[in-house]
Amino acid sequence: MQQTESFKKRIDKALHNEQARINFRSGMSGLMTKRATQFNDDQELQNMRDHARAIRSYSLSHLPELLEQLEQKLVSNGIQVHWAENSKQANEIIYQILKKADAKTVVKGKSMVSEETGLNEYLEHKDIEILESDLGEFIIQLAKEMPSHIVMPAIHKNCKEVAELFKKHFPDLPYTENIEELTLMARNILRDKFVKADAGISGVNFAVAETGTLCLVENEGNGRMSTTTPNLHIAITGIEKVVARLSDVPPLFSILTKSALGQPITAYFNMISRPRPANEKDGPQHVHLVLLDNRRSQIRMDDELLDTLRCIRCGSCINHCPVYVQLGGHAYGTVYPGPIGSVLEPQRLGLDKIGALTSACTLCGACGEVCPVQIPLPKLINRLRAESVNSQRSEAQISGKGSLRKMLEANTWVLWKWIYANPGLYRVFRWAARRFRKLSPNRLGGWTQYRTAPVPAAKSLQQLAREEGFSNE
Amino acid sequence: MNNARENILNHLRTNRKTNTPLPEAIFPEDNWEREHKITQISERMQAVHTEVHRIPTDGMAEWFQQQLPLRKLNRVLLGDNELANTIESSMPPSIQVTRYLRDIEEWKQELFQDIDAGITSTFGAIAETGSLILWPNHEEPRLMSLVPPIHIAVLKADDIYVSFAEAIDKQQWGNYMPANALLISGPSKTADIEQTLVYGVHGPRQLIVLILE
């Protein structure tokens, strides 16, 4: 139960951070409004979601074949492919590639999978300078923080906080709270790094098996810089990101940017299919792809939980979550926050480690309604809640099953089930509850912290109905 | 490390999922009139801060002749093709022309510091989303449209498709993909600080599109 206590502590801390809460509220409202402007025809939106879901479902049902096809295409295009079962293997592979190339400085485009493996920390320990180049990621790297949102990593900071951070790290530059000037500062600092970097690391939004193409979606141009300027490019992605055909890309790309940012398209769509050909003058001469499992193949074993892997990481479930908007991303304590985090992380890390995340959900259903690939998030959260308190051996292969089971709670439900299933017992219980209503406890843990305890009514509903003249119950 | 590949694939193979059908690719109606495509792409691009000019094909050289000095774009980067030759031949002497002829390793610092604008052709464009298609190659390398603070792109009006799906289909991308294919839909931008939109983060601050008719 230690995880529950530490989750509560993080929640408490988050709720007392007034500034961050204001930043989250305005950030999420903005993203929700912008998304809505992109989908003004419900039927069309539904068609788009059906199509996107079908593409992703096909990918998952044909995953081994598609991965082999992807590998074969990439290799014949000249891109080297590596497989990693877990974070440790992925980090080690990347380090070995860098070491072999004698690469000391690395610029990085945004990649959630690299957050998942803790790549930055790993490489820093090996004395490799790794610099985040996405503006939001750059800011939180300076602050030594985790992303608080998968698309907008620095959404918890306002311009004043960013200004102070820049002043601290770059004391020679003039202090400014002007967002344009801050952005320009970051541009200048990072341009110099792009010129000097030995290698670039990026994530992948879609990997196309048909052609061996890695697709990157971005607005800033740092992704293009990281994948074009240095002579070595290493991309890292989860094995689920593969799609079968090039023609699957436009519908996914379109619903991704509309759902994530409320933009019809991003400034750049970067498709990489091979290293620099002999007669070309720029682009990396060496390109690698690291395919990471990290329990994804395990998640895929379960016919219901498999849906988790359809995710295209747009973040719209997070933007629409009434719990996330109050807490922000850091309270979750995981790489992926919000609804998708509450579903993915307990499966990735174990219910015994982080299963408590599922308890924060109100089951309002907003996340499932906006998900562009129709992941039934509320249903999956409920399923994981059940798995976390289930004592019976279920089919599910989730580590930490039943780890949140509490004896008192479990026994209370067993007792209640027994009473409720026996009419005689139930009548005795009802009579006792009314007769001794004054004796019902007025301290009920968390419930009575902010509310008064419920007291059984003097008359039962059955009794009231009878008095009103309903003859037939 | 080779075990990882087999372990992952074996794990995936042990659980063969029910065969979900592959959905038909969607093609939006591509019967837009040429004029409609031009106005659509112009509107879309202008909405995200892109400057769009419609000019007659034989007026292109003149546009550069007038506009580059006027905008004080004195150091321009050209590729190694017909388009570059045409533009350079009519360039006023005040403009310093650099051709992208060397490997990037030989002049990286110079490219980052000493160029005001990069001028490229395009492989086509998409009306629906206001996007340019670029397939950089040995004549027009990848960094031309990324590093200089201003990118000027020349687009032939006949090369505009309605949708991305249509471009992939008609241009038969499936047969051969270049090292790098790009969609560019406006200048570089960010909203990472307080969701405030700022143009020109890492890529060009300004995108100018010349539609040749």
Image (cartoon, rainbow, N blue to C red):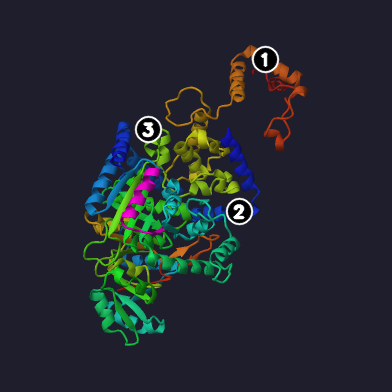
CA–CA distance in space, label 3 to label 1: 46 Å
Judge whether A207 appears above or below A306 on screen: below
Labels 2 and 1 touching (C-beta < 8 A): no
- Percent x, y for residue B204? 41, 69
Q: Is residue A225 left or right of residue A388?
A: left
Which numbered marker is on residue A427? 1
The subunit carrying tag 3 is: A
Sequence-first disc among 2 and 1: 2
Sequence-first disc among 3 and 1: 3
Name the quadrant containing residue B189. Answer: bottom left
CA–CA distance in space, label 2 to label 1: 52 Å
Judge whether A347 appears above or below A203 on screen: above
Judge whether B168 appears above or below A190 on screen: above
Majority secondary structure of the magenta segment? Answer: helix
- Percent x, y for residue A136? 49, 58
| Quadrant holding the C terminus of chain B | bottom left
Q: What stretch of residues is rendered in magenta? A: A88-108
Residue that numbered label 3 is attached to:
A301
**SS class, disc 3:** loop
CA–CA distance in space, label 3 to label 2: 39 Å
Judge by depth and name the residue closer to the eye, A168 or B75: A168
The subunit carrying tag 1 is: A
Name the quadrant containing residue A304. Answer: top left
**Crowd class of label 2 (few under 14; some 14 to 19; many from 20; radius 10 Å):** many
Name the quadrant containing residue A197. Answer: bottom left
The subunit carrying tag 2 is: A
Give the foreground label among 2 and 1: 2
Q: Amino acid at mark 1?
A: Arg
Labels 3 and 2 touching (C-beta < 8 A): no
The residue sitting at the bottom extreme is: B93
Q: Residue at x 47, y 55 (%)?
A: A261
Residue that numbered label 2 is attached to:
A20
